[in-house]
């Protein structure tokens, strides 16, 4: 006689989903309480590594290992994934004596991953184990053991790696975050590792979008009206820099500045010098600032152009960045 499937309503699925997330959240909370000085030692080992971090796991742990390796690589720690099966068939050459090895295995008795750990031992490299069983072979082979144990899987059969893989992934994330903070890894560093897609555009640098100084119209404060008009309309930038003899930015003249002075002074404006037209202390931004910050600065001051400087102290313009260029690059 066949078992009848239970009638399932929306409320059942919502409740089961919430229960699963709460159970995994509770497991993560318990894992956080197990973080000890061993975790800190593992971080120091990676920080002092002159080679790369090799992460290895098989099955579901292999998927987690790939993700951890990817996260490390994108946040400033050179890392690669090593497949245990491929390793024992010739890929052990990937592991060098200058490397650190992270091995992942919940039960800690899978033969392929044990072979990877044993090879790491043979060549004398530090081994960080993310293991669910403290008395397992993999735990004993690890120099630094990160406790990935759980009370049970969220899988109703307590069989499919679910909670255990979530905990292992979170421990890898915790390592990555600590390494980022220890290295002072910032948004500009992150941008360098993510040049593509919408994320890359948002994290691109001002220097990636600016018009360089060679094209930048420049004036002296004693420049006459004709020179001012020529500079402001030059290159279709609608703005010119007013610089001192040493090249330091002391002011700017935009097409708007010209219109305002002409409307106010009339024919007299034709006899004025650049110093009388210019806006003093124009807004600037560093060439290695994020493009998104340049856009926000322009929006907050209701301007459409910023002079770019290489040194805030000396304020010598190295370029110009325009709002239209940032919008065209889909920075927002």
Image (spheres, rainbow, N blue to C red):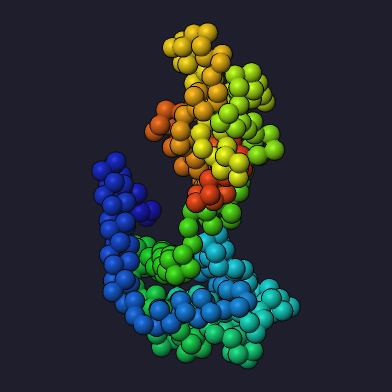
Rendered location of residue 76, percent (x, y): 55, 64
User: Of residues 278 and 293, which is closer to you in this image?
Assistant: 278
Residue 149 image point, x, y percent: 37, 76
Position of 37 compared to 42: left or right?
Answer: left
Q: How many numbered marks appear?
A: 0
Residue 75 visible here = yes
Q: Is residue 221 above or below residue 52?
A: above
Q: Residue at x 31, y 77 (%)?
A: 34
Which quarter of the picture shows residue 162?
A: bottom left
Q: Is residue 102 found left or right of 5 in the rendered image?
A: right
> Where residue 35 appears, x then y in whole percent?
34, 76
138 or 69, nearer to the observer: 69
The residue most toward the right is 90
Toward which corner of the image does residue 300 lie, by quadrant? top left
Q: Tell me if residue 75 comes above or below residue 175 in the rendering.
A: above
| Quadrant the N terminus occupies | bottom left
Residue 273 in percent (x, y) is at 55, 23
| Front-most of residues 33 and 132 | 33
Whether residue 64 can be seen here: no
Quarter-of-image position of residue 221? top right
Q: Can you say whether 314 is above or below 298 in the image?
A: below
At horizontal 65% and vertical 85% (from top left) the residue drawn is: 97
Q: Residue at x 35, y 54 (%)?
A: 3
């Amino acid at each position: 006689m066949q078992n009848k499937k239970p009638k399932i309503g929306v409320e059942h699925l919502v409740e089961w989903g919430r229960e699963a997330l709460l159970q995994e959240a509770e497991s993560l909370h318990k894992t956080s309480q197990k973080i000890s000085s061993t975790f800190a030692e593992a971080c120091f080992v990676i920080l002092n590594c002159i080679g790369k971090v090799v992460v290895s796991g098989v099955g579901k742990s292999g998927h987690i290992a790939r993700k951890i390796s990817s996260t490390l690589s994108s946040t400033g720690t050179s890392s690669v994934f090593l497949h245990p099966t491929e390793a024992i068939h010739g890929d052990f050459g990937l592991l060098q004596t200058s490397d650190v090895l992270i091995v992942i295995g919940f039960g800690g008795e899978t033969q392929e991953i044990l072979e990877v750990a044993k090879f790491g031992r043979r060549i004398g490299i530090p081994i960080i184990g993310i293991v669910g069983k403290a008395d397992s072979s993999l735990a004993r082979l690890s120099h630094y053991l990160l406790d990935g144990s759980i009370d049970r899987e969220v899988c109703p059969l307590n069989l499919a790696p679910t909670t255990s893989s979530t905990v292992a992934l979170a421990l890898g994330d915790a390592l990555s975050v600590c390494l980022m903070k220890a290295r002072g890894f910032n948004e500009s560093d992150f941008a360098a590792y993510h040049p593509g897609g919408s994320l890359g555009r948002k994290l691109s640098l001002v220097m990636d979008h600016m018009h360089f100084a060679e094209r930048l119209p420049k004036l002296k404060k004693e420049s006459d009206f004709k020179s001012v008009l020529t500079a402001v309309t030059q290159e279709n930038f609608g703005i010119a820099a007013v610089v001192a003899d040493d090249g330091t930015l002391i002011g700017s003249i935009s097409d708007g500045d010209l219109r305002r002075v002409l409307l106010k002074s009339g024919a007299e404006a034709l006899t004025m010098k650049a110093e009388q037209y210019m806006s003093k202390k124009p807004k600037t931004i560093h060439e290695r600032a994020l493009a998104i910050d340049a856009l926000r600065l322009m929006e907050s001051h209701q301007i459409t152009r910023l002079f770019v400087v290489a040194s805030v102290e000396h304020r010598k313009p190295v370029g110009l960045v325009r709002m239209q260029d940032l919008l065209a690059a889909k920075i927002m």
